[in-house]
């Protein structure tokens, strides 16, 4: 049963994982659009700094909690975005069992709150559910090629199971659940030290290099600016009818890691060299979303080109303390997203 506030009252949206990189941008956008926002986060990989500018906002509430052990949520909510989960390999592999529980139990717990409130639900899934893809670009109907016992399984399989739970709630008519399969996203507020490819290269270039390249650098990724992604998440949450199937959200422009490194060097006028390292276990070699479904059913496609989107991302890292020269992050860098 939906406990609606009066028609003119701002509708309350919960963002689990709202103190993280993507979640904090989503909270900001929702507030700007007049919503009330409950941000729930354990600060496992997010930070207080990400939401600090929002804490005095009259329509913003922060709850520090783990989605595996949720406290009662008293305020009625109309929408729940579930972004709670460490997203970079170094972080999600630090406590793989907790990562799996976050994906499965955490998603189930949030779905239960959605059911109690009659709220719509959006699950932040990932292109990692495709594993090392045999199909390129990846369409949503592709069932993936995931190593279910490897070091990445806690995340890849956890996210696959979370999708399954969402569709079980949807099929049972219990929750209006939607699933976004997010591809590599970049932008301001990425952490400098969690080993994601874009932040890794920028931070090292700012520190004078060398830029770490894992494998040959010929592997590809498609990079979506966080502003585009947030637009896509909100469009998917609000579109009618519910697509009833997962939707890829990402930028289909595909780059090799070497091309990305070149772009970063050019933007920073950096003469830094490259340092080659072995490719991490199960790191996918290709990633590119087929976004035909997002275009057709959600009316969304990204607008920010990588060369443009790197500008505010680089500004962000320039305004925060760069890592020392040569302090490379974990080598598990490219698979996320
Ligand atoms: N960034 C990407 O490129 C990308 C790609 C694919 C999918 N995703 C998904 O999008 C979501 C957000 O990713 P992000 O890049 O902002 O990562 P992030 O690590 O910056 O944000 C995740 C947030 O979830 C919180 N969190 C983690 N476990 C929690 C738990 N058990 N209970 C409560 N809070 C918890 C963290 O503290 C953090 O604030 C994740 O679910 C991730 O799997 C991200």
Image (cartoon, grey):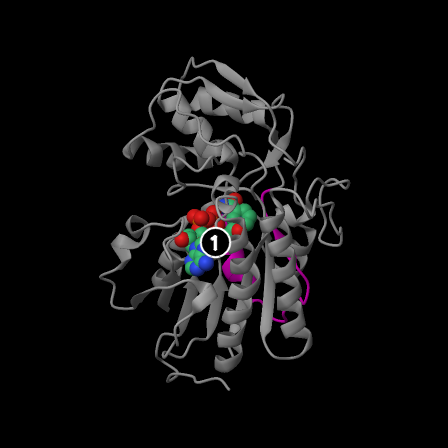
For label 1, the SS is helix
Residue at 65% x, 56% y: name it: 160
Measured as percent of width and height from the top left, residue 222 is found at 59, 38
Relative to 90, 178 lies left or right: right
Label tally: 1
Relative vertical location of residue 293 with respect to residue 145 in this rendering, above or below: below
Is any part of residue 257 visible from this angle? yes
User: Which of the 4 image quadrants contains residue 194?
Assistant: top left
Residues packed near mark 1 inside 10 Å, few (<14), some (14 to 19) or many (20 plus): many
Residue farthest left in this picture? 56
Residue at 67% x, 71% y: name it: 168
Q: Is residue 53 magenta?
A: no
User: Which of the 4 image quadrants contains residue 29?
Assistant: bottom left
Is any part of residue 33 visible from this angle? no
Measured as percent of width and height from the top left, residue 190 is found at 41, 41
Which segment is the magenta one?
228-251
Measured as percent of width and height from the top left, residue 86 is found at 48, 49
């Amino acid at each position: 049963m939906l406990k609606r506030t009066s028609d003119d009252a701002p509708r309350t949206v919960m963002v689990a994982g709202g103190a993280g990189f993507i979640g904090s941008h989503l909270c900001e956008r929702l507030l700007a659009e007049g919503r009330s926002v409950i941000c729930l986060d354990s600060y496992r990989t997010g930070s207080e700094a990400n939401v600090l500018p929002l804490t005095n906002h009259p329509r913003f509430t922060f709850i520090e909690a783990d989605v595996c052990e949720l406290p009662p949520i008293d305020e009625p909510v109309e929408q729940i975005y579930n972004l709670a989960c460490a997203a970079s390999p170094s972080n999600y592999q630090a406590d793989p069992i907790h990562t799996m529980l976050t994906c499965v139990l955490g998603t189930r717990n949030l779905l239960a709150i959605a059911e109690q409130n009659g709220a719509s639900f959006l699950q932040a899934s990932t292109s990692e559910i495709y594993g090392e893809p045999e199909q390129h670009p990846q369409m949503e109907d592709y069932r993936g090629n995931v190593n279910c016992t490897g070091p990445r399984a806690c995340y890849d399989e956890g996210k696959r199971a979370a999708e399954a739970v969402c569709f079980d709630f949807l099929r049972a008519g219990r929750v209006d659940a939607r699933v976004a399969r997010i591809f590599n996203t970049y932008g301001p507020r990425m952490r400098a030290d969690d080993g994601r490819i874009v932040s890794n290269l920028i931070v090292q270039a700012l520190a004078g290099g060398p830029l770490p390249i894992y494998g040959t650098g010929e592997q590809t990724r498609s990079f979506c600016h966080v502003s585009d992604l947030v637009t896509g998440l909100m469009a998917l949450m609000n579109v009618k009818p519910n697509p009833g199937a997962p939707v890829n959200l990402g930028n289909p422009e595909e780059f090799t890691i070497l091309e990305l490194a070149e772009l970063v060097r050019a933007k920073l006028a950096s003469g830094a060299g490259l340092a080659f390292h072995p490719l991490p276990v199960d790191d996918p070699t290709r990633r590119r979303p087929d976004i035909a479904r997002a275009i057709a059913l959600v009316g969304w496609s990204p607008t920010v080109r990588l060369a443009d989107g790197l500008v505010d991302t680089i500004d962000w890292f320039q305004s925060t303390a760069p890592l020392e020269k040569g302090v490379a992050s974990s080598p598990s860098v490219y698979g996320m997203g």
